[in-house]
Amino acid sequence: MSNGSLWEYANPVKFMRLSGRVLPWVAGLAAVLVGGGLFWGFFLTPDDFRQGSTVKIIFLHVPAALVAINAWIMMLVASLVWLIRRHHVAALAAKAAAPVGAVMTVIGLFTGAVWGQPMWGTWWAWDPRLTAFLILFLFYLGYIALWSAIEDADTAADLTAVLCLVGTVFAVLSRYAAFFWSQGLHQGASLSLAPGTRMDWAYKAPLYACMAGFTLLFVALLLAGTRTEIRARRYRALMVRERMYA
Amino acid sequence: MIALLTRDLRLAFRAGGGFGLGLGFFLILAVLVPLGVGPEPRTLGLIAPGILWVGALLACLLSLDRIFALDFEDGSLDLLATAPIPLEGVVAVKALAHWLTTGLPLVLVAPLLGVLLNLAPGAYGWLVLSLLLGTPALSVIGAFGAALTVGLKRGGLLLSLLVLPLYIPTLVYGAEVVIRGAAGLGVTTPLLLLAGITAGSAALLPFAAALALRVNLR
Amino acid sequence: MMPDLGAYAVEVTLAWLGSLALLGGLIAWVWLRGRRVRAELDQIENRSERKRHG
């Protein structure tokens, strides 16, 4: 191979090609579903008999919370793929997913807290679901911080992958702990979509659209972010080479 | 392995080994909280279990970076990695040393601080038991965190950010044991879960920590 | 067109505006960072191209 290409692995090349073709479509579809779903949910749904107009918040809260969790699961899988198969794309994909997941967690927290305000009378309540999400946010922060703190890319990939694995176990433990811990509270209305009642189709349809849209948005941002990380890695490699032969 | 244990213990007890640090911090916390919250006995009594447990967490945190950092810096960690004992065993021994020099003293001192914080009379036994069962987990989890950050120069703050969320389950169940025990409610669930987390961590985290150490020693 | 948000107008507006701002910020950050890194890479690739062929 000539001294031109530093793409030592076939993987990144194939990924860049495939993702480059797929990304515009994913992004476009995401925009349609998110835009359409949110528009529909905000303007075209009736108020809930109990919750009033605050029911409109579910179109943001539920999809964001969904992505917050799924992003972490994706990071877990990607971390395993990196540790076992050493595909750089997997490690970089996990790295790219984290900020998206973290922001979605914040949106979930923010909307959850505001949604609960009329019910609880405070701008924040230590509801077990919200608390579990807050803890998840802390795990995201730690993961992102560890990536930033370590200079060597492969070392960072390894350590963050191990952290993700261990973190997942403890995040799950924390979720159950949060529910156990909140049993001491008066069992007031908890933040849920009244699981007993069936949700009316008037809400279900736009909600599903938003959930699908947010998931596609995550995929789009993930593809874009991973492409950026791959480019950044190539940039660093070229910088090193430049300095060596300068 | 015993030799490693005695060596680490001796290092910890030497001047500058950080032995009294955790205890000192724990005591200071027990003084600061009433100063910040007001001396009202009822309030203090209500929050005492939580304060003592959070204090134990933070005090353990203080000496975590010592677990591997000193050996990493002078090269002894490389030697330990190639020694006949598996690196996982080294991690376990170092976590044990950390517990003996930080966690166990906390367990012994906690009742005294409970007096300062107006802890409910029925809670003392539960306090000691929960800390006894939970602090080993803090040492093992802390050792994992220390292994992740051992290569970093000023990794202290990052270490705290990584480790404190991992401490949450132990904290919740530990404090719940004390709170429920004091109120006369059933404590089997939190107690078992607390013990389970400690046991699971002690069994599995040394492997994760050894992996992290090998990565950092590359 | 604008629905009557009733008693909870403040909460709903706050939740929606805040979330859209966060979403917009996230998308903008990913996009802008992508552009910046791509530009840096192009620059450095041009430099090494020129060195080899120049």
Image (cartoon, coloured by chain):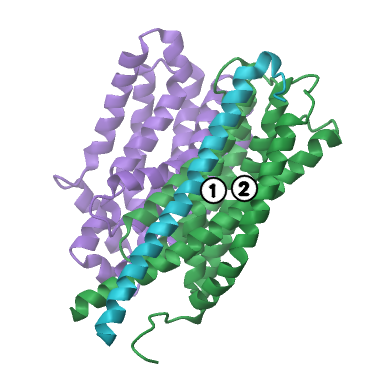
Chain colours: A green, B purple, C cyan
Foreground residue, A170 or C10?
C10
Residue A128, position in %: x, y? Answer: 61, 31
Foreground residue, A162 or C48?
C48
- Judging from the image, mark 1 belongs to the subunit labelled A
Mark with earlier residue (2, 1) = 2
Q: Is residue A89 left or right of residue A55?
A: left
Residue A139, position in %: x, y? Answer: 48, 46
Q: Is residue B145 left or right of residue A98?
A: left
- Between marks 2 and 1, how big is the CA–CA gap? 7 Å
Q: Is residue A197 left or right of residue B199?
A: right
Residue A36, position in %: x, y? Answer: 71, 42
Q: Amino acid at mark 2?
A: Val
Please tell me the numbered disc located at residue A101. Answer: 1
Residue extending farthest to the left is: B15
Residue B49, position in %: x, y? Answer: 46, 24
Any part of residue A41 in sight: yes
Q: Are marks 2 and 1 in contact (CB under 8 Å)?
A: yes
For residue A38, above or below residue A146: above
Q: Amino acid at mark 1?
A: Gly
Disc 1 crowd rating (10 Å Cα; few below 14, some 14-19, many 20+) is many
Secondary structure found at label 1? helix
Please tell me the numbered disc located at residue A121. Answer: none
Q: Quadrant of residue A197?
A: top right
Residue on which disc 2 sits = A67
Q: At 51% from the left edge and 27% from the top edge, which residue is drawn?
A: B178
Disc 2 crowd rating (10 Å Cα; few below 14, some 14-19, many 20+) is many
Query: The C terminus of chain A is located in which quarter?
Result: bottom left
- Judging from the image, mark 2 belongs to the subunit labelled A
Query: The N terminus of chain A is located in which quarter?
Result: bottom left
